Image (cartoon, rainbow, N blue to C red):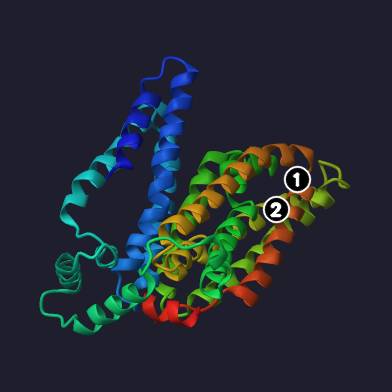
Amino acid sequence: MIAAIPNIIGWLAISFARESSFLYMGRLLEGFGVGIISYTVPVYIAEIAPQNLRGALGSVNQLSVTIGIMLAYLLGLFVPWRILAVLGILPCSILITGLFFIPESPRWLAKMGMTEDFEASLQVLRGFDTDISIEVNEIKRSVASSSRRTTIRFSELKQRRYYFPLTVGIGLLILQQLSGINGVVFYSSTIFESAGITSSDVATLGLGALQVIATGVTTWLADKAGRRALLIISSVGMTVSILIVAVSFFVKGFVSDDSSLYSILDIFSVIGVVAMVVTFSLGMGPIPWVIMSEILPINIKGLAGSVATLANWLTVWLITMTANLLLNWSGGGTFAIYTLVSAFTVAFVSIWVPETKGKTLEEIQRSLR
């Protein structure tokens, strides 16, 4: 609810801006609000969801993000940017109103010692006809064993139960962005134009629609195929896709612009970009947020999750700021760098990332000790 307020003020500042300083202020406020929401939403979903639906519901968060991106592309074709900024206030207003009608996280209430509120919240979430006694006892045991002290010493981070989930959570969220996905999405119109596609804005809208479809498939598969399998499939697919783009750009440097081979390479580069976005949406887009919200211990979840989210958004900023510079330097070189990162992600997931499908949050914590 707090995060929605700077978002509303930020959109108003952008919409009624008379000079660039208002645009900067609006973007800064939007970044502040979105930064809070991007962490608290997946954590809240993980803490309220039944174990057999946690992956699907967690993936719905990213699905909503991709739908928002697609709507921005679509409305941007017809609506002036000032009106588009005003429309951004609508979901923020719905968020504030809607939050009055949903319960607080039962696990957070249990951690705060609000036993009656904790059980009442869990009962509302599970349904009044559901027996919640087993889940209540499991959450109580987990909270009792992890909250003897409200803070931990820095030296305790050497314990596997702390350093391992921190490494996995932060690693996944950094690698998610180092693959260059935001650079590709933000500059997709430029990439399509360089490939000779005249209606680049329409092509970008199509790319957004494919993101929505692929993320929707992930929502369905997350609790069936498992998180780890989807991450491996996604990162392997991204590696191959980006490699196709890199090779296409490199070879184009040795081919004349008017040759048929040059046109074929343009087609391959577009296919590679589209395949990269689709395979990213199948795993590396939604799943890192799901896993991060699942594996962090409850007594460091606030601090550790904030650090992981900060690392993610700093990487977003780095990629966004450098993507255009790198593409101007060398299209092939840029995508070659992204290919290496995606290949490393395959190894990272295979070695480090545990499977969390079908386990309660408390069972996940016990397995990490």
User: Callout 2 environment at 10 Å: few (<14), some (14 to 19), or many (20+)?
Assistant: many
Rendered image quadrant of residue 94: top left
**Nearest to N terminus: mark 2 or mark 1:** 2
Rendered image quadrant of residue 258: top right
Examine the rendering and report whether any part of residue 240 can be seen: no
**Is residue 336 positioned above or below 49 on the image?**
above
Q: Residue at x 47, y 68 (%)?
A: 291
Q: Which numbered marker is on residue 331?
A: 1
Rendered image quadrant of residue 146: bottom left
Q: Residue at x 81, y 41 (%)?
A: 257
Instruction: Work out whether residue 76 or residue 232 is closer to the camera in this orientation and state it.
Output: 232
User: Callout 1 environment at 10 Å: few (<14), some (14 to 19), or many (20+)?
Assistant: many
Looking at this view, name the residue that lies furthest to the left. Answer: 129
Examine the rendering and report whether any part of residue 324 can be seen: yes
Horizontally, residue 94 falls left or right of residue 328, namely left
What amino acid type is highlighted by mark number 2?
Answer: Ser
Label 2–label 1 contact, CB within 8 A: yes
Horizontally, residue 166 falls left or right of residue 143, namely right
**Is residue 21 positioned above or below 167 on the image?**
above
Residue 32 placed where, x, y %?
A: 42, 39
Instruction: Work out whether residue 300 or residue 42 is closer to the camera in this orientation and state it.
Output: 300
Horizontally, residue 287 falls left or right of residue 352, namely left
Q: Tell me how far mark 2 sits from mark 1, CA to CA.
A: 10 Å
Residue 49 placed where, x, y %?
A: 30, 70
**Is residue 346 positioned above or below 200 on the image?**
below
Residue 129 placed where, x, y %?
A: 11, 79
Q: Dot 2 corresponds to which residue?
A: 269
Q: Which numbered marker is on residue 132?
A: none
Instruction: Work out whether residue 59 or residue 360 is closer to the camera in this orientation and state it.
Output: 360
